Image (cartoon, rainbow, N blue to C red):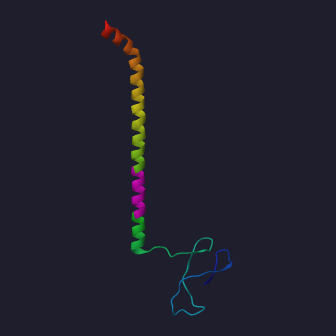
Amino acid sequence: VRWTAPDGTERTGRARADADAGAGSAVTVWTDREGRLVSEPPGGAEARFQTLMAGATVAATAGGMALLAGWVLRTRLLRRRAAEWETEWRLVEPAWRKRMTG
């Protein structure tokens, strides 16, 4: 096929055409902003399916990120609590030991 790109240059490429289309017949092609051939955009059920899958992917990613953030927060809080426990035990342990050993 031959087409004119947005910048005015003549371009050529390969595209599917009906078997009975003769040379010079008009054929619908899809191009991007630079004038390169691209595939036809999805339509109908395929577009709905792609939208559904994109939404499911975003939801799963957001859920995974929330779980990861919760896990990181919980881990940090547990470490902090353990460090505070250790610090307090260092203060209490000498008196505790004296009381236990007499």
Judge whether 27 appears above or below 52 on screen: below
Percent x, y for residue 7? 67, 74
Query: Is residue 96 shown above or below 39?
Result: above
Residue located farthest toward the front when viewing the structure as drawn: 101
| Residue 53 quadrant | bottom left
Left or right: residue 58 versus residue 34 is left
Q: Reply yes or no: does residue 54 show up in magenta.
A: yes
Q: Quadrant of the N terminus?
A: bottom right
Q: Is residue 21 above or below residue 8?
A: below
Q: The magenta stretch spans which residues?
A: 53-63
Q: For the image shown, how many numbered marks are present on the structure? A: 0
Give the answer, above or below, for where 16 lies relative to 81: below
Question: Which secondary structure type mostly characterizes the magenta part of the structure?
Answer: helix
Between 80 and 56, the residue placed more toward the observer is: 80
Residue found 42% across the figure and 65% down from its top:
51
Residue at 39 percent of width and 59 percent of height? 56
The quadrant of the image that shows the C terminus is: top left
Residue in the picture at 41% in, 60% down: 55
Image position, residue 82 (x, y; %): 39, 27
Q: Residue furthest right?
A: 9
- At a point 39% along the width and 28% down the height, the residue shown is 81
* Residue 20 percent location from the top left of the image: 51, 93
Residue 95: say if magenta. Answer: no
29, 93: nearer the viewer: 93
Query: Residue 48 is drawn in which quadrant?
Result: bottom left
Residue 61: x percent and y percent? 42, 53
